[in-house]
Image (tube, helix red, strand yellow):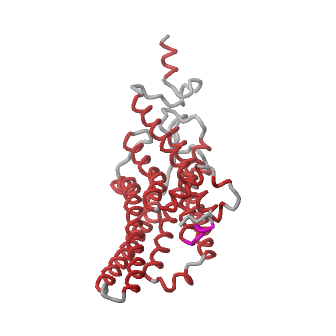
Amino acid sequence: MMETLGEAELCFPQLLNTSCKKPTGPHSDTVLVKVLMSSVSLLTVSLNLLVIISISHFRQLHTPTNLLILSLAVSDFLVGLIVMPFQILLTEPCWLLGDLVCALYFVLSFITLYASIVNMVLILVDRNVAICDPLRYPAKITANRVRISVLLCWIYCVFYSLPLLSENLKQPGRYNSCYGECVINVIGAIDLILGFIIPMSSIIILYMRVFVVAVSQARSMRSHIAAVKLQRSVTVTVKKSELKAARTLGVVVAVFLMCYCPYYCVSISGVELTMASSTNTFMNFLLLLNSCLNPLIYAFFYPWFRKSVKIILTLEILQPHSCQTNIL
């Protein structure tokens, strides 16, 4: 009987000397975390799939800005489809899928999460040109240039993530202290500078420029409110839409920073967290939650998304020529 209990505490009972031990204690918290993350994962996949279908199907939505939103939705979709389910497995006492799967999971995780960050930078660059230099926007930001930028974004994320985790891929499991762990080693300084400080600084600077220009333009329009009635109504409408776009983008940026900053702030503080610690689990969950919140923001602020979702869910999308439906 005592031998059975002893074996039950090991991840791999057949490996008595090298197997990790299962922590003992109540599992109610773990079950709650699994249910919550499973729900968020399903919601993330569903909502981002709706964004992908909407932008891909309806021709009116084939704009340079929406192509960038499409790329962001693809990265968020992959986070919900691949990263979140494996993150749920990491809350288990033991990792049972082997060292190679552990290393590959983190590679895919880094690629998709970095793609979200770079896509956010590209969206802000696009909005920066649209609001700060609207006359030259059609010439500067074309569909082909955006496609090339998106392609380069994903290539960069792949070639950035692989060297960062190269040691883990060359010898999977080299940082494990026992069988049943999933531990990797990341070059923290490089990840902190290239994965957080530079892109986050770019995001904040670009957005502040967008917001300042949008607000100044709106004030300028209000000062000329006594101009010709037709000119006033048209121009004020345009400037109000730009200010609304800047505010919507501000919500996206604020949510993005709230989800990403805590994770990296802990890294900067030098606090070491174990993979199974509750703080580490919360930080990872918050990081991944951003992929679910992005499409919710679209649903709340963008009428075209709500209208396209209604058409998709009512199966009107299956009708002939539905791609030409007026969405805007």
Placement of 15 over or under 274, stated as above or below:
above
Residue 260 occupies which quadrant of the picture?
A: bottom left
Which residue occupies 41% across, 74% down?
242
Residue 298 visible in this rendered orientation of the protein:
yes
Please state which of residues 13 and 193 is positioned toward the viewer in this rendering: 193
Which residue occupies 60% across, 37% down?
97
Q: Is residue 177 left or right of residue 149?
A: left
Residue 107 visible in this rendered orientation of the protein:
no
Q: Is residue 26 left or right of residue 161?
A: left
Residue range in magenta is: 59-64
Which residue occupies 48% across, 17% down?
5
In the rendered image, residue 195, in percent from the top left (x then y), is placed at 47, 62
Please state which of residues 60 and 246 is positioned toward the viewer in this rendering: 60
Residue 99 occupies which quadrant of the picture?
A: top right
Placement of 181 over or under 285, stated as above or below:
above
In the rendered image, residue 229, in percent from the top left (x then y), is placed at 37, 85
Can residue 61 be found in the magenta stretch? yes
Please state which of residues 197 and 2 is positioned toward the viewer in this rendering: 197
Placement of 154 over or under 29, stated as above or below:
below
Placement of 229 over or under 324, stated as above or below:
below
Can residue 11 be found in the magenta stretch? no
In the rendered image, residue 124, in percent from the top left (x then y), is placed at 46, 71
Residue at far right of view:
320
Residue at far front of view:
229
- Determine the main secondary structure of the stretch shown in magenta: helix
